């Protein structure tokens, strides 16, 4: 009997150890991660970097070099407007008042809200989930919708303005309005819903650097607004990263608010701030004090497009954001 007990104990130890090992995610270098719209939360409490983006998955790192994952962290309500399996784009993690918030774009492909110029527009909107922990799970809050159901909106980000009120800043997609916009909407103090209506900040056509060609080959302003992210410079100037296209190249630009508030007016820089083929930028401070920008690039592999996250070292000490060089952890 004692021998049988020992054999069973050994079997359980080996089996349990094997199961635990199978649940451990292998760590890989940043350039092996495939991720669109990367967003990094540098969480001081856990001394861990949490990276998310399109796809609703999470990666974790202690040093920015090796990343474990992916982990699924969003738990949506299948009975909500999102449906049982929504697409998730451009997720962001924000810490606010002892909670962690998941700002993301959710798309229900089974619901069509409009058809414009032959394009069928699906039900898509920015929304916010909440968690007590940076790695989730993130779950719905009180309000079922934050933005109008008949508008395709995307890439919502978070900002507390000089009035002390929290806001979502988001894109109203060009597929419906023909000239993409970036707008703001006030949020409830616990971020559980929105207040009032969205307000225009600027249009895609306001940019001097983004451009495209019409059917006749004439150059005109590009219609795409993508990936807004708010920041303050060392002198207290309010800036916004946002992305569009220069012909067929995804490109990162920046604008600055003359008033120092979300209301602007927003003045666009004349030139992009990164090399071509980088975009959807965000900023974070590494644990060693370096200011970094996270972006993604596009690359063709075996006939399909993949997106790879990258970091740039930046300088925020002056009146403007300055991109210094690529950062290799």
Image (cartoon, helix red, strand yellow):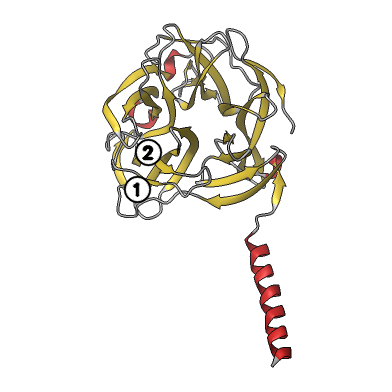
Q: How many marks?
A: 2
List the single residue furthest toward the left: 196
The residue where tag 2 is placed is 127
User: Of callouts 2 and 1, which one flags the residue occurring earlier in the amino acid sequence?
Assistant: 1
Whether pointer 2 and pointer 1 mark residues with C-beta atoms closer than 8 Å, the reply is yes
Image position of 25 (left or right of 187): right
In the displayed orientation, state which residue is furthest to the bottom. Answer: 1
Q: Determine the CA span between mark 2 and mark 1.
A: 10 Å
Res. 329 image quadrant: top right
Tell us which disc is closer to us: 2 or 1: 2
Q: Residue at x 66, y 19 (%)?
A: 314
Where is mark 1, residue-wise? 82
* Towards the viewer: 243 or 62: 62
Does residue 121 appear left or right of residue 246 in this picture?
A: left
**Residue at the spot x=41%, y=13% of the render?**
261
Question: Crowding at label 1, few (<14), some or many (≥20) Cα neighbours within 10 Å?
Answer: many
- Give residue 247's position: percent from left, percent from top: 55, 23
Task: Tell me the quarter of the picture where residue 274 sits.
Answer: top right
Determine whether 126 is above or below 274 in the image: below
Q: Which mark is residue 228?
A: none
Instruction: Confirm whether residue 249 shows in the render.
Output: no
Q: Position of residue 171 (x, y in %)?
A: 40, 28
């Amino acid at each position: 009997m004692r021998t049988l007990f020992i054999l069973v104990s050994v079997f359980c130890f080996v089996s349990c150890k094997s199961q635990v090992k199978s649940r451990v995610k292998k760590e890989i270098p940043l350039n092996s991660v495939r991720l669109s719209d990367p967003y990094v939360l540098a969480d001081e409490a856990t001394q861990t970097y949490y990276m998310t983006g399109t796809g609703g998955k999470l990666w974790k790192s202690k040093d920015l070099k090796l990343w474990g994952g992916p982990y699924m962290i969003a738990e949506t309500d299948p009975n909500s407007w999102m449906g049982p399996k929504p697409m998730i784009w451009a997720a962001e993690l924000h810490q606010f008042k002892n909670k962690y918030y998941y700002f993301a774009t959710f798309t229900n492909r089974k619901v069509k809200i409009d058809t414009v110029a032959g394009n069928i527009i699906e039900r898509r909107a920015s929304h916010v989930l909440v968690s007590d922990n940076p790695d989730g799970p993130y779950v719905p809050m009180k309000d079922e919708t934050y933005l109008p159901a008949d508008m395709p909106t995307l890439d919502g980000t978070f900002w507390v303005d000089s009035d002390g009120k929290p806001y979502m800043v988001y894109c109203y997609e060009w597929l419906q309005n023909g000239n993409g916009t970036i707008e703001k909407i006030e949020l409830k103090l616990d971020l559980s819903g929105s207040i009032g209506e969205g307000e225009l900040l600027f249009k895609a056509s306001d940019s001097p650097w983004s451009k495209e060609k019409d059917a006749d080959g004439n150059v005109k302003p590009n219609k795409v607004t993508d990936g807004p992210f708010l920041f303050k410079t060392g002198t207290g100037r309010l800036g916004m990263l946002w992305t569009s296209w220069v012909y067929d190249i995804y490109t990162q630009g920046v604008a600055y608010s003359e008033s120092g508030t979300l209301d602007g007016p927003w003045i666009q820089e004349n030139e992009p701030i990164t090399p071509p083929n980088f975009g959807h930028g965000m900023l974070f401070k590494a644990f060693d004090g370096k200011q970094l920008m996270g972006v993604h690039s596009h690359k063709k592999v075996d006939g399909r497009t993949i997106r790879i996250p990258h970091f740039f070292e930046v300088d925020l000490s002056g009146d403007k954001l300055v991109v210094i060089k690529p950062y290799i952890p």
